[in-house]
Amino acid sequence: MARDKIYIEEEFPAPMKQLWLTFKSTPVAIWALGCYVLLLLLAVFGPLLSPHSAMENNLDMLLMPPAWHVDGNISYLLGTDDLGRDMLSRLIQGTSLTFGLSIIVVILALVIGVVIGSISALSRGVKASLLTHFLDVVLSMPSLLLAIIIVAILGPGLTNVLWAIGLVLIPQFIHITRNAIKEEQKKGYVLIPILDGASELRVLVTSIYPNIIDKIIIQATLAQSAAILDIAALGFLGLGAPVALPEWGSMLANSLDLFYIAPWTTYLPGLAILIAVVVTNLVGEGFRHSLKLQKEN
Amino acid sequence: MFSFALRRLNLLFFTLLMLTLVAFSLNYFFPGSPIVNMTGLVNASDAELATYEQMYHMDQSLFFQYLAYLKEIFSGNFGVSMSTQSPISEELVTYLPATIELSLAALFLAMLFGIPLGFIAAIFHNKGADKTILVIAMVGYSLPVFWLALILILVFAIILPWFPSSGQINLLFEIEQVTGFKLIDILLSDSPYRWQAFLDALKHLVLPAIAVAVAPMTIFIRLARTSMLEVLESNYIKAARAKGLSNLKIIYHHGIRNALVRIIRDMGLQFANLMTLAMIAEVIFDWQGAGSWLIDSIFQRDYTAIQGGLIALASFTFLINIFADFIYAALNPVERYARHGT
Amino acid sequence: MRCKWYWLITSVIVFISGCEPTTNEESIFNDGLVYCSEGSPTSFNPQLVTSGTTIDATTRQLYNRLIDFNRDNYQLEASLARSWHVTNDGTMITFYLRKDVQFHQTRYFTPSRNLNADDVIFSFQRILDKTHPFYQSVRGNFPFFQSINFEQLVTNIEKIDDYTIRFKLNQPDASFLSNVGAPFAVILSKEYADQLLSEDDPAVLPMLDSLPIGTGPFKFNEYRSNALIRFQRNENYWAHDVGIETLIFNITPNNTGRLTKLLTNECDVISYPIAPQEIRSRENLRLEEVTSFNVAFMAFNTSKPPFDNPVVRKAVSLAVNREAIINAVYFDQAEIAHSLLPSASWAYDKPSELLPYAPEQAKLLLQDAGLSEGFTLDLWAMPVQRAYNPNAMKMAKLIRSDLGKIGINVNIITYEWTTFLGKLANSEHQAVLIGWAADHPDPDNFFSPLLSCSSARSGSNRSFWCNQNFDDLLAKALLTRNNKKRREYYLQAQELLTEELPLLPIAHAKRAQAKVETVQGNILAPFGGISFADTKKVTKEEN
């Protein structure tokens, strides 16, 4: 039996849902999100989708220009590199390295950062003050510089680069989580469960997290665009992925020698990086914009 | 002001402590014997090493070793580079100024173009100009600096032969190094070709400075835009408007000044960012700075150089941050009390 | 403040508007030459090195040797020695020196006398005499001279008079004159060495090799590691007037960077140009090539498994598709190496059996060696480009896919060049892609420095292969002055190498160089590095 509405029900969607509702209404943001999902799919299913092998040399097809060029070949849409490897396949498989790994790194950093941030928000005294100092120090340094320093310590290599970038991102998440939690703690709604006798942890999980998750996600998109650029930059400097892997940054560095005879091998990986970063930034921008609109209303 | 300064110095102390601790412990983590890693003397005989072990108190507990290490660091002794065997401090004095020079030039460009563009975007909020500028900012922010650098070289050095593609100056000009800042060194030198050399050095500076400036410029655009929007919505502007001041006057007299103060707050952070970008650009533009030096050292596993570079670069960016904080605090008294410890 | 701004703005306007160079500036650019080289020298004394980059930067710029090779017919010709004489039994060689040769005058040394016999004796004594302070200052590290067993060969160097010296040899050595003409056998100033000794501080002794004094066409001015070397004209050069006032070696390891600098005219000459098509397509650039006695090879480290087993070496050699390498790495500017010796050498003969590309056979051999499962191979690829190997990294990638087909999993390893060489000499590698550019046309120069037992000890034998039969053949070849007999021995030695395969010869390449058209005069030479002594810049009108 349907219950009669006895008073006008006012709906308060969860913050994430609110965010999504506003986000949906911005066309650019939706487009960007679509592209983002596409990149994600490429990262996961790249090897299945790519027409040729990304690692196998093909000596009959050295330096084939892209298909729109007079000497191009339609089965090598974006041409080949100096070892006859299909550029399109390499770029597609590079998605899972540059783009895919950046997501993994950001998620790990996010989880660790949120945990530490929550603990620090709940603790006081010397420990908290030490952490503040530590954060101030780390946050005042650019992420890439820190990553370079950490790679200098750990030694070059893709795994070390991921460690470095993860370590660099964690403080950002600690910082934002801690500040957000402290801000929420001052608000009235948190007081109610506390007065009801709920434990601090319970308050955190049931009341505070749902209200700060939007901020963390926005931070995550920022972190991811930085992570993509950093992975690529370190790859470019030769500190990251080994030469054979189709990581975009190291692809670009490897193709430098071909800059004049086969320019597509240089500008295509650069474009791939640019697109991935723009898409990530646009998604983040969409979220931020929506959040701002919500606040204004 | 006093307690503000005290807090900042406290932070500086903490940072240096952390940095030196990390650098010190690296000597033990890096392969090879700690004393060789500290001094960089890869070819030294055992007897020579023994005297150095004494100097670094290697026979005592880690704590005293650390103190001895600190003493050497603060007296400017970072050891010698493992690959070139010349003192790290000398190499730093040679290379760091070049990076700073490039970063300053880029900072200048980034502010010169970024801030006005940001203001324009704010004044035409939500109009065509605003949107165009935001799109430019988004793309500029996402450009990988190394790729941008290559494109700049291709377009402005090769297709259009306007600027040289690399280096700090045409090497045929012989300029004695005094400060390490090329432009200053040229002015200090007594070369008969001083003026041409100066122009040549400026030309060499253009492309790298643009490559480094683009990303920070977009950040300045956003900062300037947000600050100006905030200022324009504040009560004193509303009051000014109510008084009947023209829009132009309001923006000129109140808007720009107040927005600029906010921008300075982030200048320190941006400078650190610029230095990092400059380090990468150096590799491409063959710029003899700390960035390409550090990256070379990483490749050569030159542990003394890595340590020295770490301490120098990190403390330098940190000092710049604190410096910017002080300027901001001087300009904006409210900040002295509120900002720290949040 | 205001005036500063004004000044800045005018300067910006001036340089944007193209800033017409004044006459002064033109003279700087016309008398100066920028050569973009591929790497830093490891020393400023070629006695201490084997690396071609160091030879390029030092030998023919800063120094002279007693005798030299003719650029065209590869024959010996006079240099610091105006003539020489070999006794019939081949054990005594007398050199008669020029009397008009001055050493460099620089800010750190002023010579008081011309070159004489003392300088020559000093230059060789420091290599021979283990108690010599300048032997000890470099810990006796003279890799070239060690690889040819110089200290065993020469019993005595005698000063006949101020301008005559006589070498006494243990036994006749057919390659002795060629070795004295090699780019490593430069003549240093004894007076400069004495000046350093008089400071009574062992720490200044290495300056003999780092702040060089020689007799060559250029004087050393400044060196910044990984950045530049600045040379100044030697106004008192004994042979002829030097056309260039300031010679800069701009060290640019990056291939594209060098080409870019050539295209933008920041360099007048570049070493090892990539993209020859691009250079040929530009009117104001010239591409030059010279047949160069060199070989690129893959050396197997025979001192440790799995390459201590000749069967494994053979298997890997069969599996490498060298024709594809010639095509992809050298763009067909090289020929497949069937032997260490290039076919232009008089001691070369086509081997009876050429090594084929036969991966199937290679697999069978691996099975014989008990490695049918395959193994993981650390293949080292040198980080620099050389005439003999313009892109070792690419070569390594090709070899990786070749060896992948017979189940060998290849890791490519590389380091910065100096580190790389150090680690090679320490035998840290399994196999390495490297090569050799001959120092002089004598065939011995291909065998002794690369594969003799003494070179295995000094580290320049990258295979660490030591075979008594092989060494005996080389020794016999040196004892005879009869070229027909020598050739016979070298042919046997080559047959032995084809059987044993301590290294796999890959290619003999031409050495190329690109320059702007205003630079005239020969720079490339077939042996002993490059020389700017005869180079000058001409303006377009003169051209």
Image (cartoon, helix red, strand yellow):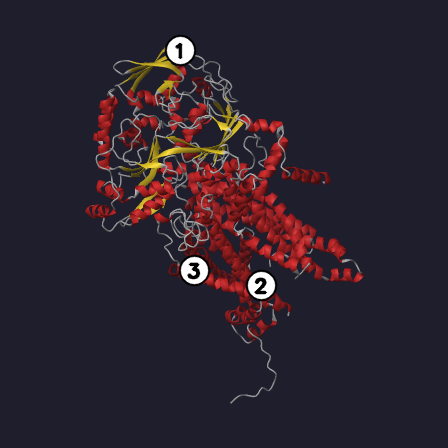
Distance CA(mark 2)–CA(mark 3): 25 Å
Q: Horizontal placement of A213 versus C304: left or right?
A: right
Q: Which mark is residue A288?
A: 2
Q: In this view of the protein, which residue sits in the foreground, B51 or B1?
A: B1
Q: Residue at x 39, y 58 (%)?
A: A50
Secondary element at tag 3: helix
Image marks 2 and 1: residues in contact by CB distance under 8 Å? no
Rendered view: A284 above or below A270: below
The amino acid at mark 3 is Ala
- Residue A201 image offset from top left, x and y in percent: 50, 69
Subunit of mark 1?
A: C
Subunit of mark 2?
A: A
Determine the residue located farthest toward the front in the rendered image: A70
- Disc 3 crowd rating (10 Å Cα; few below 14, some 14-19, many 20+) is many
Q: Quadrant of residue C396?
A: top left
The amino acid at mark 2 is Arg
Q: Which residue is mark 3?
A: A43
Q: Horizontal placement of C359 versus B38: left or right?
A: left
Q: Which mark is residue C162?
A: 1
Rendered view: A273 above or below B172: below
Residue A92 in sight: yes
Rendered view: B208 above or below C185: below
- Disc 2 crowd rating (10 Å Cα; few below 14, some 14-19, many 20+) is some
- Residue A211 image offset from top left, x and y in percent: 55, 69
Q: Residue at x 72, y 56 (%)?
A: B255
Q: In this view of the protein, which residue sits in the foreground, A152 or A240?
A: A240
Secondary element at tag 1: loop
